[in-house]
Image: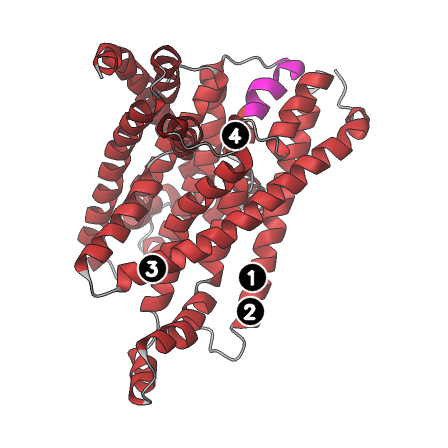
Amino acid sequence: MRFDLSILWPHLPFLWKGAVLSAEVCLLAIIGSVVLGALVAIARTSSAKPLRWLALAYVDLFRNVPFLVQLFFFYYGLPELGIYIDAFTTGVIALSIAGGAFASDAIRSGILAIEPGIIEAAEVSGLSRRVIFTRIVLPIALRTAIRPLGAVLVNMILTSSILSAITLNELTGSGRIVASDTFRPFEVYAVLLVFYAALTYAVSIAVNLLHVRLNRGISQDVA
Amino acid sequence: MDQIVYAFPFLLQGLWTTILVSAIVVALSLVIGAALGVGLVYGPLPVRLAVRILSDCVRGIPILVLIFMVYYGLPPLGLRLDPFWAAVAALTLFKAAQVVEYVRGAIGSIPRGQMEAGKAIGLIFSDRLRFVIFPQAVRRFLPPWINGVTDAVKGSALVSLLGVVDLMHAINQVIGRTYEPLPLYLLGAALYFAINYSLSSFSRVLERRYAFVRE
């Protein structure tokens, strides 16, 4: 059989809609992940033992359970408790929670990499603990963590394809529909492969540029 | 609860499939990934370039799409795999790309002088790898690789979407009968967690043990 991409022309708008949905989910979920990851990173570096322990349990739990299990738990499991959430929101929540576990590690190592002298200087200047954290520690930590956070985002784009399993027709879900409509699965999935590879490649380049921009003026071995 | 006890042997069968898929994927990807990894470090330019592109592309593709590609996309080209092997093939490709990076990192961490010293005492290339580079590199390779095995176990849950009855699929089938998703998903999560947590803990122990390997 012939490899014929023109067969996909009429379906491009549909695939595009799927891609936009993927992008929306990922964008919301990366914001959720970074916020959650920052909170968990604070908990993991705090001096309260129960808090540290709880944060570590969260990270270990969500890193070691397949995303599909987490997703089905939220989508099919929670209604048993009377909690009904639609597929889009479930997807964003599940990706945020799973991504938060990875993001927290990135942000935590960013926090740990901060020179103690900087914090001591802030303490000596009489800044409150809250100000020190939000104005000094977190900005520096996020700046050093930008590359690992980019890896979390790339992973999230890849993982978001699994949302097609809970009837959310993002890019992969739309691709499945088009494949079964046109009976040309090879072309459809080839296009998806190229699209995802290009997208994640572009994202990692953008993250690198951002990293260089945010860390300008800092010697390379520190950044 | 009784129903879960009743379904337990069935779930164990699913768990066995999950372990089987993971084990085959891990073994195949280790062989393929190690060969490609050595090619990436020591091969001639075209080989290096090819492996680099392959590895970068595969790591930028969702495993699920890769699985669908192999299972639904290849039959029109005349390559028809059953769901089990299609999933194994896709997961192996994905995992091999990871192994390539671990191998590259591990070999790259060995000082150049080691290779040159091997040359100086007259070892041929394969002996230099076997007696000089690999014994040192393996200590750098093992911790991340064992940690990466958890990715194979987690990825294996996706074979359920092709209808292979692994742990995930077995759970879904039991839920289809008992209408009790919550405890069953918790049980599934606990089983996966037990496997993966022991793997990542083992990786951490090894990492600490091998921490003495420093330049």
Our reading of the magenta stretch's main secondary structure is helix
Residue A179 point in image, percent of width and height: 67, 21
Q: Nearer the viewer, mark 3 or mark 4?
A: 3
Q: Position of residue A83 (x, y in %)?
A: 41, 33
Rendered position, B132 above or below A90: below
Q: Nearer the viewer, mark 3 or mark 1?
A: 3
**Which color mode does the image show?**
secondary structure
Tag 1 or tag 3, which sits nearer the N-term?
Answer: 3
Q: Amino acid at mark 4?
A: Leu
Residue corresponding to mark 4: B64
Expressed as whole percent of the image width and height from the top left, the position of residue B14 reads: 32, 16
In the displayed structure image, the side of residue B105 where residue A182 appears, left or right: right
Q: Is residue B20 above or below residue A201?
A: above
Q: Residue at label 3?
A: A41
The answer to whether dots 2 and 1 both sit on one chain is yes
Q: What's the amino acid at mark 2?
A: Val
Q: Quadrant of the N terminus of chain A?
A: top right
Give me the residue at 63% from left, 52% from top: A202
For the magenta stretch, what is the residue range? Answer: B68-78
Tell which of A171 and A35 is nearer to you. A35
Where is mark 1, residue-wise?
A208
- Do marks 3 and 1 share a chain? yes
**Front position among marks 1 and 4:** 4
Q: Nearer the viewer, residue B29 or A169?
A: A169
**What's the distance in space between the residues labelled 1 and 4, CA to CA?**
26 Å
Label 4: state its secondary structure: helix
Query: Tag 3: Cα neighbours inside 10 Å, few (<14), some, or many (≥20)?
Result: many
Asked if marks 3 and 4 touch (Cβ < 8 Å), the reply is no
- The residue singled out by tag 2 in the image is A212
Q: Is residue B70 magenta?
A: yes
What label does residue B135 carry, if any? none
Residue located farthest toward the bottom when viewing the structure as drawn: A125
